[in-house]
Image: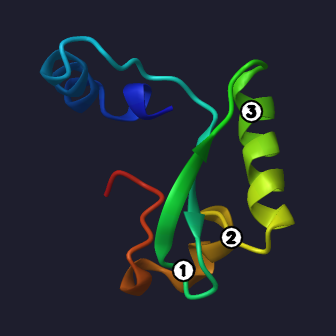
Amino acid sequence: MRAEEKPIFMRYLIAATDEQIFPEGGGLQIRDAAGEVIGAVGVTGDTEERDEELAAHGIHAIGLKTDEDCAAMGRRHGIRLTNR
């Protein structure tokens, strides 16, 4: 979860929005065939893992990709799956 990966950034983001957002798992970026981010989807209501699984299913159902699908494309396509 991003809050665990980048706690200082998340605290800043929450404060900057006057506490109008909160970190929650279950969201994934939506990528096109070239690996470009074209949107995002969020699912909530179950465990974080199940929410992300359902988000990925929805993305795949409409023929698009997730970060995981595009991981082999590497940074040249702007995909970063780590904090480095």
Three-letter code for the amino acid on which mark 3 is drawn: Asp
Q: Please tell me whether residue 15 is drawn above or below residue 37 in the rendered image.
A: above
Residue at (75, 53) in percent of width and height = 56
Residue at (31, 58) in percent of width and height = 84
Give SS at disc 3: helix
Residue at (81, 42) in percent of width and height = 54
Dot 3 crowding, Cα within 10 Å, few <14, some 14–19, many 20+: some
Residue at (48, 59) in percent of width and height = 81
Task: Identify the image quadrant of residue 3.
Answer: top left
Per the model, the C-alpha gap separating discs 1 and 3 is: 22 Å
The answer to the question of whether label 1 and label 2 lie on touching residues, with beta carbons closer than 8 A, is yes
The answer to whether residue 28 is visible is: no
Image position, residue 63 (x, y; %): 79, 74
Q: Which residue is mark 1?
A: 35
Three-letter code for the amino acid on which mark 1 is drawn: Gly
In this view, the residue in front, 16 or 1, is: 16
Marked residue nearer the N-terminal end (1 or 2): 1
Marked residue nearer the N-terminal end (2 or 3): 3
Q: Which residue is mark 3?
A: 51
Give SS at disc 2: loop
Dot 1 crowding, Cα within 10 Å, few <14, some 14–19, many 20+: many
- Left or right of 6: which side holds 60? right
